[in-house]
Amino acid sequence: MATQQIPAQRADQEQRVVELSIQGMTCASCVGRVERKLGRLDGVEASVNLPLESAVVRVPASISDQDLIDTVTATGYGAHVVHPDRPGGDAHDHEHTPSLLGARLVLAALLSVPVLLISMVPALQFANWGWVVFALSVPVVTWSAWPFHRAAAVNARHLSSTMDTLVSIGVTAAFLFSAWQLAADPTLTQHPGMAGMDAHALYFEVAAVVVTFLLLGRFLEASAKQRAGNALKSLLSLGAREAHVLRTVDGERIEVTLPADTLIPGDEFVVRPGEKIATDGVVTEGAGAVDTALLTGESIPVEVTAGDAVTGATINTSGRLVVRATRVGSDTVLSHMGRLVSQAQSGKARIARLADRISAVFVPVVLVLAILTFVLWLVLTGDLDAAFTAAVTVLVIACPCALGLATPTALLTGTGRGAQLGILIRGPQVLEDTRTVDTIVLDKTGTVTTGAMAVDDVVVLSDMDAPGLLRLAGAVEAASEHPIAQAIARHAAARGRLPETTGFSSAPGGGVRGEVDGVTVTAGRAAWLEENGIRPTGEQTAAFGTAEDAGATAVWVAVDGDVAGIITLSDTVKEGSAAAIGHLRRLGLRPVLLTGDNRAVALQVAAAVGIDAVDVRAGVTPAGKVDAVRELQAAGATVAMAGDGVNDAAALAQADLGIAMGSGTDVAIEAADLTVMGNSLEQVAQAIELSRRTLGTIKGNLFWAFFYNAVGIPVAALGLLNPMLAGAAMAASSVLVVANSLRLRSFGR
């Protein structure tokens, strides 16, 4: 993903997408600074993610990777390009790893406890206790607080400020003010019981305890972020490590065990029961059952045999399979899933831009408020200690950690959980689209029904015999990807070898035409026959209507311009489709069934799953599907569309929210906003619910982050809050936001 090329029409417009790992960011202000600096480069667009410590940057050809790294470095942070073989970054800012933060936290806690007890409990004080407290505080406000001081110094060199600036200034001010008072009067704590809460207050305990609380918050935050990212890491590590590749040596086929990443398209490899399939491919020999739960979330194994496609990282549960590799490396479904999840986690929803705009000016405003608080307290009360305490409290409580974590932690957790369930969210803006959707259009074949059409009957309407008619129809239909065409072709091929077809042509959702054994065969819908100048007689049309009224899908077959017969097929409703429709209704969505089949078939399916007859659109062409979506939109509906075929791609793109079934075609998946890797309609409902839940979590996080600062800063400025309590509250706010986001990990359990 580091240097993914994006096609462009002109060389000067050619762009790449580069992923950077960024070290040293601690809050929303850091994110805003990096985005602004990168955005000043000509043609560069950047989206920075705080929990992932990364940036996804769209870069024109004129900008090099080193230009990006130099820009980030000049901003005060470290950066390097993430390489495609190490998704998510291969290094982190060691200052902010849980292990080092834990060490700093342990030291701070061990020293802060005696500092706090001695300073606040007169019975524990002894002669010159202030100097002991001073000595115990020094390691806390220096080594333990070093990440805050270091970040503040880096930003200061660039005439900037972040939440670390507030922490560093507050802690340093409390420590230096206390040290100055103690140095000015070395006998200040000469007598036991002289608590530092009197006229000559010492604030060593404030400095030490604030550092401890903030380190605790950052440690818990770092640990939670690490857990939140585990879903993506688990996804990317699902692939098989080895493959048993078949090689021909001296005319004999032997198995050679090779690393899975050395496979190339065309290689054949053996998969035994219990082994992972090394990469995407097609079964060439054997039959078995494949457990796809790792990618699709579905627990029931899928039966496969020769000719069936299989996906890398899924598990063969029974039978010996020989698979021919079709896609390897970054082209596989697993890699595609990883890219989609990572890109979604690195993006930003529109709602998050509000937090970015506020954080850009937040820290300077807080610094001004702290100064004003100090001056006003000093002028109005003349109490230096009270003025100092209020100012430090404002600095400590205002840190915008929670604001910076509100959106990305929810995205990280929600999209990661989605990946575990086989749900891929293309980008954060999709979350907001799911909130407004009120109507969902469902393609019948492959979405509501199994899509596994089966031939029921061959009705001859000419002097040709049924086997001959089926043979001709099967030959021309074999060149089409449509489920109905494939069903006819499979049925015909099972009864004999099919002849070659030449001059093939087709219309999506209409029918096919080609030359077979010297005759022109046309098969499809009535409109397709008319388009080719073929008009059935009244008797033939009546026979066709009878077949459709019985609930079958009927296909015309004509030979050399004359109707030769009808082939009827049937489909079955997917198990769970009715429950899924109920789930969609509970989410406030109105289901609409869309199909190219006749109305009798469509009404039967609709009745079986609980869709109202007035919401059935039958006999719809692919272009008509787009028109149906537009018609609903024109009536004021916000439309989601779920489909799985090539003929659904245009409608998926037209819909306000496109949902592709992962069992469908690549073009359908590319046109969609949401992808469910399984073929269950329940996953569609689950995808919408997860998206809405993730958006709700983001909104909740932002509300509490804003509310916390809106209430906390005035309370601190009025002198109603102790700096130590402010530090604890600030740490708690960040942990609360991350913990709220982590609740998404239990979705669907």
Image (spheres, grey):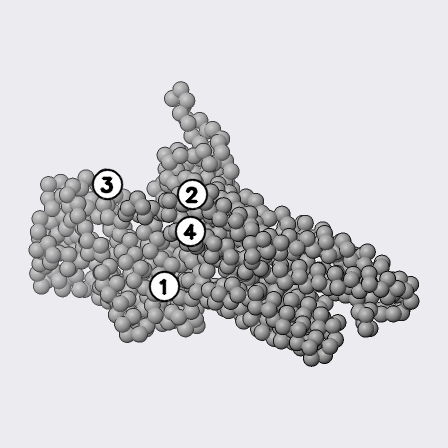
Q: Are marks 1 and 3 in contact (CB under 8 Å)?
A: no
The answer to whether one can see residue 621 in this image is yes
Q: Are marks 4 and 2 in contact (CB under 8 Å)?
A: no
- Closest to the camera, between mark 4 and mark 2, is 4
Of helix, strand and loop, which one carries label 4? loop
Amino acid at dot 2: Ser
Q: Which residue is mark 3?
A: 496
Q: Residue 723 placed where, x, y %?
A: 71, 68
Taking the spot 15% from the left edge, 56% from the top edge, the residue there is 528
Q: Nearer the viewer, residue 92 or 614?
A: 92
- Measure the C-alpha gap from mark 4 to mark 2: 11 Å
Q: Are marks 1 and 2 in contact (CB under 8 Å)?
A: no
Q: Nearer the viewer, residue 166 or 634?
A: 166
Amino acid at dot 4: Leu
Task: Please rate how many residues cluster around mark 2, counting C-alpha atoms within 10 Å: few if below 14, some from 14 to 19, many from 20.
Answer: few
Q: Are marks 3 and 2 in contact (CB under 8 Å)?
A: no
Of helix, strand and loop, which one carries label 2? loop
Query: Mark number for residue 41?
Result: 4
Query: Mark number for residue 657?
Result: 1
Of helix, strand and loop, which one carries label 1? strand
Task: Please rate how many residues cluster around mark 1, counting C-alpha atoms within 10 Å: few if below 14, some from 14 to 19, many from 20.
Answer: many
Q: Residue 498 placed where, x, y %?
A: 21, 41
Q: Earlier in the sequence, mark 4 or mark 3?
A: 4
Q: Earlier in the sequence, mark 1 or mark 2?
A: 2
Of helix, strand and loop, which one carries label 3? loop
Q: Which residue is mark 2?
A: 64
- Closest to the camera, between mark 1 and mark 2, is 2
Task: Please rate how many residues cluster around mark 4, counting C-alpha atoms within 10 Å: few if below 14, some from 14 to 19, many from 20.
Answer: some
Q: Residue 187 placed where, x, y %?
A: 88, 64
- Measure the C-alpha gap from mark 4 to mark 1: 33 Å
